[in-house]
Image (cartoon, rainbow, N blue to C red):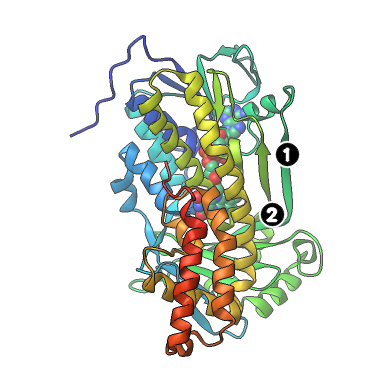
Amino acid sequence: MAFQPSPITNLKRNVTILGAGLVGSLLAVLMRRRGYPVTIYERRTDMRQASIGAGRSINLAMSTRGWQALALAGLKTEMESLAIPMTGRFLHQPDGSTAFQPYGTHGEAIYSVSRGELNKRLMSLAESHGVRICFNQRCVRVDVSENILHFEGDHEPVTADLLFGADGAFSALRTSYSHMDRVSARQDYIEYGYKELNMDPGEGSAKWRMEKHALHIWPRGKFMLIALPNTDGSFTCTLFMPFEGEDSFEKLKDDSTVQAFFEQHFADAIPLMPDFLTQFRNNPVASLITTHISKWHHAAQSALIGDAAHAIVPFYGQGMNAGFEDCTVLSHLMDTHEEDWTSLLKAYEQKRKDNGNAVAALALMNFVEMRDKVADPHFLERKKIEKQIALRFPEQFTSIYELVSFSHTPYSTVMQCIEAQDKLLGRIMAEGDFEQACGRDAFNDQLQAWMEEYHQQVQSLDFTGQ
Ligand SMILES: Cc1cc2nc3c(=O)[nH]c(=O)nc-3n(C[C@H](O)[C@H](O)[C@H](O)COP(=O)(O)OP(=O)(O)OC[C@H]3O[C@@H](n4cnc5c(N)ncnc54)[C@H](O)[C@@H]3O)c2cc1C
């Protein structure tokens, strides 16, 4: 049965959202479903009118936290049919050999989803519920105390009742908060940039010319290429490397250096991207940013959400997932706080700010893992042991990757588990070959004791999610 939004009553405040991106559009659906009248102001033109071929736009990895929010919006089943499960990393080594590393202990997957398609469907769903989206309206500044939005051009200022800034990493609301007294705000660019390249689909039955159900990585120490599958058989590749220095974008200035670089480092990708030189020339290099801000909301009037609150680097595939989780948390808080927006927005900030900082740190850590460690034998051994421990002690141990990607454990709790897991796995690995060690009774007794110690260290943490 089609969803009927709750009727609008004058008990519900008028909601204004800045940005019809992934998070703004999802939030609009959730608010409208609860009976709030919602208007979105979006800087860009309506992407549904632009001619982007289906499946050819950039993709994103969706994991458990993202799916939970889509389920709340009633869009999970529809998006699942367009998502490609990726059950592990497919490594492309410099010598041409390949290896597959499963993500989960029980075949769990993250999912490659078209960003454009997801955004379009969220916007259409929002509109079908009665949300008004005003395109080509760039907010330049918010008068925070009066809750007045100022726009570029001749658009009259708008006084918002309840405002959410879902306007991304360079949020106008965030910038306006940052100019207030006693607000700390920081944005950190990393020295790496990224460039996207496309691998065309194959013909007929060989539509996917590499393993379809994997996230492909060419880890090369200081830089890496990754590729995620699209439903049309193509792969969207992203080259992450420093802007400057020995192996860097600044060194790849002309076709001959790019050709030589790809032949040296990504030889097996060249036949799959015959036009890579043209793409390399034409596609821009973009920068990567992490943002932190001490103030996430103002009184009962406004709040930041998604990248506007916590832009992070993309190496854990968690930016959108974390933003969607913000929406889930906000939605759950509406169950308990009803229309008391003063305490609701305060509780939202309390619940999410530490998690925003934690996921930012996790994302930076995972960059080192992806570009460097995944090809390191020591790291691979550790991953193998993690899986064995998770199978032997399922109630006590879940790996950091699985906690981030396949659970609702608060990111701040995941951060707190890292040290305890490092200690545990360090002890185990110091015993030499794990399988052989498991044949010794003394080792198994010791392992049991270490597991108990680990359990004691983490059991007081909050694993409950929202
Ligand atoms: C290379 C790369 C790969 C990524 N991969 C993943 C991944 O695999 N998984 C994952 O979970 N996340 C990933 N992310 C992160 C993800 O893209 C973001 O976290 C997500 O897009 C955030 O959504 P958002 O709606 O908060 O912000 P945005 O997507 O940035 O949307 C903001 C919206 O606000 C509009 N807007 C901006 N300023 C204004 C203004 N002043 N006035 C009005 N409107 C405005 C914009 O036009 C836009 O529509 C990746 C990011 C990058 C850069």
Residue 462 against residue 278 in the figure, above or below? above
The amino acid on which the numbered mark 2 sits, given as a three-letter code, is: Val
* Front one among 420 and 251: 420
Name the image quarter holding the C terminus.
top left
Residue 410 against residue 178 in the figure, above or below? below
Q: Is residue 264 left or right of residue 462?
A: right
At label 2, counting other C-alpha atoms closer than 10 Å, the crowd grade (few under 14, some 14-19, many 20 or more) is: some
* Front one among 461 and 409: 461
Residue 87 against residue 345 in the figure, above or below? below
Residue 257 x %, y %: 75, 72
The numbered dot on residue 285 is: 2
Residue 88 x %, y %: 44, 69
- Name the residue beneath numbered marker 1: 186
Residue 147 x %, y %: 59, 15
**Mark 1 or 2, nearer chain start:** 1
Badge 2 marks a residue whose secondary structure is loop
At label 1, counting other C-alpha atoms closer than 10 Å, the crowd grade (few under 14, some 14-19, many 20 or more) is: few
The numbered dot on residue 112 is: none
The amino acid on which the numbered mark 1 sits, given as a three-letter code, is: Arg
Structural distance between the alpha carbons of marks 1 and 2:
23 Å
Question: Dividing the image into four equal quarters, which quarter contains ligand 1?
Answer: top right
